[in-house]
Image (spheres, coloured by chain):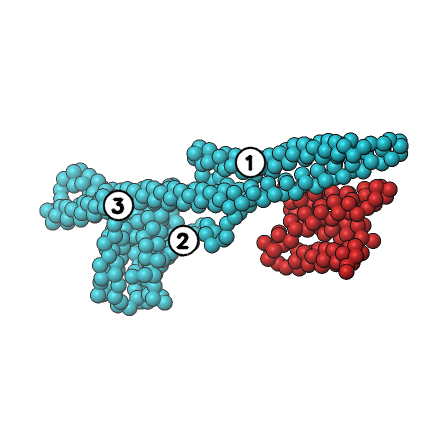
Chain colours: A red, B cyan
């Protein structure tokens, strides 16, 4: 029988694998559609990680909660930069922000 | 036009905007709801407040509804902003079409994105480019036509001047030998014939009439001799045909005649009678080179008339795939007319 820790580790591993795969696809693959899909996936995933972080963290750790939401906010910023930004620079920064949001969000949630 | 490029549909892009707005609104809702829930529970705990289950459910419900309402409003606002930005391109296109309607054909639609609107902008750009090309072609044709009329009108003046001079001579001179009269009348008739031919060209819109010549050297020799005849009263004329062996060629006789007429006309007006006029005809690398050299007289060439004659020669040379080279210093004028395709 699996206990809740086993489940947590499975969820952690699955999320890590998925996020790493998306980051690799976004930065290494040259196909624009793959890059775009990976970016949008990562941005939404970053927001989900922030929500998950809140659900997993007791309210007695307000610092970690705030950092978690802040990292989720980076994903929102990345998404808005892509959709609203007309500057080419913003389009280059957005994927980096999404990747940072997911990686640090995961570290904040599980470590 | 990039027909092969895979286009995204505008409707799909708008659906993407809905999805993105929804994701951000959902994130906001979760943030507001979970944070507000945490704060309220912390407040209840800190202040030792006791709530029953119904009150907790009511509190949760209120927080959830409030968060949902804020998220919904945020969703609508974000979606409208994103949609407005997407549709603002239509305004750009409308301004572009207005500019084209106002005949600003140089206006180029900016290309944004890769959807049906981009395709529309590309199509409009293509149409305006085509329209520009047509207008430029029309302008060039009109210019060419005008140039043709100007050069032919100028070329008509040369035999007309001869007719006027000879008829005036016949009118004023009383003791004329009948043979001399006939010779002058024959010349007048010939010049009138030339005028008729030139007006025919004018009426035909510059239509050429090339015909093959078995011995083109003989033809050129005759034209040079006619030029000599026209000039011999006032100038010493030398004709050099040593580098021109007999050859075959297809020429429009009237065009060759016009080349020599213009050369003669310019010599009569601007050459120094004290120095010889030299005509050289040569066949060089399959091209016919008609060269002429004379000393410059004291009379300054009025640029317009002089250039008109040279332009006429240039036009003719151009129609034979050739060129005209003019060299001039303080004392000597020389011109080389190269005809390559005959």
Q: Nearer the viewer, residue B136 or B14?
A: B14
Q: Quadrant of residue B161?
A: top left
**Callout 1: SS:** helix
Residue shown at 54% from the left, 37% from the top: B87
Label 3 to label 2: alpha-carbon separation:
28 Å
- Which residue matches tag 1? B88
Nearest to the eye among marks 1 and 3: give it: 1
Of residues A68 and B4, the one nearer the viewer is: A68
Identify the chain of the residue marked 1, using the numbered disc in the image. Answer: B
In primary-sequence order, the first of circles 1 and 3 is 1
In front here: B295 or B133? Answer: B133
- Note whether residue B29 is visible: yes
Q: Nearer the viewer, mark 1 or mark 2?
A: 1
Subunit of label 2 = B
Report whether mark 1 lies on the same chain as mark 2.
yes
Looking at the picture, do discs 3 and 2 lie on one chain?
yes
Secondary structure under the numbered disc 3 in the rendered image: loop
Residue wearing tag 2: B326
Q: Nearer the viewer, residue B250 or B176?
A: B250
- Image disc number at residue B205: 3
Q: Residue, x 65% and y 32% (percent of image)?
A: B73
Question: In x, y percent, where is residue B321?
Answer: 35, 58
Mark 1 closeness class: few <14, some 14–19, many ≥20 residues within 10 Å: few
Mark closer to the chain start, 1 or 2: 1
């Amino acid at each position: 029988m699996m206990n809740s820790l086993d489940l947590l580790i499975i969820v952690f591993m699955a999320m890590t694998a998925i996020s790493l795969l998306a980051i690799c696809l976004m930065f290494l693959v040259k196909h624009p559609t793959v890059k775009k899909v990976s970016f949008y996936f990562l941005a939404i995933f970053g927001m989900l990680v922030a929500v998950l972080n809140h659900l997993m963290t007791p309210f007695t750790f307000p610092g970690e909660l705030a950092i978690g939401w802040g990292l989720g906010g980076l994903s929102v910023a990345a998404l808005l930069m892509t959709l609203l930004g007309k500057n080419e620079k913003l389009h280059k920064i957005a994927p980096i922000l999404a990747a940072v949001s997911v990686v640090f969000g995961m570290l904040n949630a599980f470590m | 036009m990039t027909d092969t490029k895979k286009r995204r549909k505008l409707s799909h892009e708008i659906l993407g905007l809905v999805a993105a707005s929804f994701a951000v609104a959902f994130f906001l809702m979760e943030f507001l709801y979970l944070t507000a829930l945490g704060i309220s529970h912390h407040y209840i705990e800190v202040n030792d407040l006791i709530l029953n289950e119904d009150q907790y459910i009511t509190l949760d419900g209120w927080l959830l509804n409030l968060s949902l309402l804020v998220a919904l409003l945020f969703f609508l606002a974000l979606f409208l902003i994103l949609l407005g930005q997407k549709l603002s391109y239509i305004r750009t296109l409308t301004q572009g079409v207005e500019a084209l309607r106002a005949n600003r054909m140089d206006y180029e639609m900016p290309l944004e994105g890769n959807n049906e609107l981009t395709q529309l902008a590309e199509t409009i750009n293509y149409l305006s480019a085509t329209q520009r090309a047509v207008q430029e072609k029309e302008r060039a044709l009109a210019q060419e036509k005008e140039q043709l009329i100007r050069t032919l009108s100028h070329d008509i003046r040369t035999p007309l001047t001869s007719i006027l001079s000879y008829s005036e001579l016949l009118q004023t001179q009383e003791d004329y030998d009948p043979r001399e009269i006939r010779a002058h009348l024959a010349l007048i008739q010939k010049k009138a014939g030339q005028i008729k031919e030139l007006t025919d060209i004018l009426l035909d819109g510059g239509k050429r009439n090339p015909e093959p010549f078995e011995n083109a050297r003989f033809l050129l020799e005759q034209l040079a001799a006619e030029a000599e005849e026209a000039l011999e009263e006032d100038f010493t004329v030398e004709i050099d045909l040593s580098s021109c062996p007999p050859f075959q060629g297809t020429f429009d006789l009237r065009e060759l005649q016009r080349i020599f007429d213009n050369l003669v006309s310019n010599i009569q007006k601007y050459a120094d009678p004290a120095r010889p006029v030299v005509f050289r005809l040569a066949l060089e690398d399959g091209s016919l080179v008609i060269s002429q050299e004379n000393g410059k007289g004291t009379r300054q060439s009025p640029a317009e008339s002089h250039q008109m004659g040279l332009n006429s020669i240039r036009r003719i040379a151009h129609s034979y795939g050739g060129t005209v080279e003019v060299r001039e210093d303080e004392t000597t004028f020389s011109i080389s007319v190269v005809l390559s395709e005959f």
